[in-house]
Image (cartoon, grey):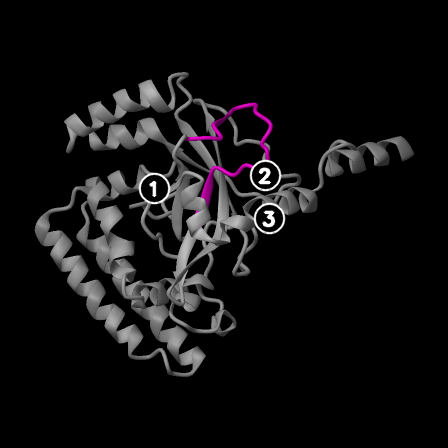
Amino acid sequence: MVRICLLFVSLLAGPLNAETLDAQLARLTASVERFQDISIARAEGWRRVTGHVNLMGEHWARRDNLPDYTRGDAIDFAQPSNLLYAEVDGRMELISAAFVVRIGPGDPHPDGFTGFRDLWHVHNIDEILDSQCSVRPFLARVGRSWVDRNMAPDGLRRLAMVHVWLGPDNPNGLFSNFNPHLPYQRLGLAPASWQGDMDAARGMALAHRDGCRNELDGDLFLADASGSTKRQLKRACRSIARQVRDRLDAPASERDAFAAAAWRTFDALVSKTLTPAEQGRIDALVEGDADLPSMQ
């Protein structure tokens, strides 16, 4: 019985020589400290690869596309694949990092960080390109050729990704995809004033001066929505965003309740307006998960 108990404990703890999660996070934090100054990141070859994703930030990657982790590789926690920045108080702040591992069809998520807390999601490049074939056949064909030659000549075209928040603190967890405190900081509000409703955080994100653009542009491009659909949704978003902004000085509970209701109204309008085919092209961005937004 003692041997069985010890075996069970060892399975939970992992190998005796495994690096602890705290040690992995300490290595990551130390390795990116200098990138708090975004000019240093630029000087070392980092470039922005997405616009601001609400509740997530801008993704930056190295110009040389390194590190290029593939299935089975040991991740160097001092070498993240992405840095994520967000404008807060007029200054670009480093808020998180991400690791990307290229895997193949049927491959499981990478082992990643010690323990079971890291949350991986997958961007399947083939599914994304396939979803665009009916509306952008030339772009899809060129994209697939570029991927085959430059990005994944080995056929590993599923991008498994995990985020690690460096600051502000994420109440949803260190490895969560979204940080509900971020919209509050960007609006000059205390993160602690968030009332705990993710819909409220999404509504508050719209209230930022670029909130509607960040929310819609990437999705509407992927959807290949018509001009009239784009105008309708952008007009509705701007109206809702103004209403949320008008209540930023209200008591936190009242403000957040309104922001949550505003988001639900807008989200319902988007669902009603987009066709199933348009929504399907958006959903193809993330394998098996329609909740992650597009990256502009």
**For residue 217, side relative to residue 90 (left or right):** left
Disc 1/disc 3 C-alpha distance (Å):
22 Å
Q: Tell me the residue at 40%/73% (across/down).
A: 256
Count residues near mark 3 (Cα–Cα under 10 Å), then give few for <14, some for 14-19, many for 20+: some
From the image, tell me which residue sits under label 3: 29
For residue 115, the mark is none
Amino acid marked by disc 3: Thr
Amino acid marked by disc 2: Ala
Image coordinates of residue 126 in percent, x first then y, are 32, 26
Is 159 covered by the magenta stretch?
no
Amino acid marked by disc 1: Val
From the image, tell me which residue sits under label 2: 78
Given contact means CB atoms under 8 Å apart, are the residues at marks 2 and 3 in contact?
no
From the image, tell me which residue sits under label 1: 49
Q: Tell me the residue at 31%/37% (across/down).
A: 284
Who comes first in sequence, dot 2 or dot 3?
A: 3
Note whether residue 1 is visible: no
Image coordinates of residue 262 in percent, x first then y, are 30, 69
Q: Nearer the viewer, residue 3 or 183?
A: 183
Number of callouts:
3
Residue 253 versus residue 78 in the image, above or below: below
Residues shaded magenta = 65-84
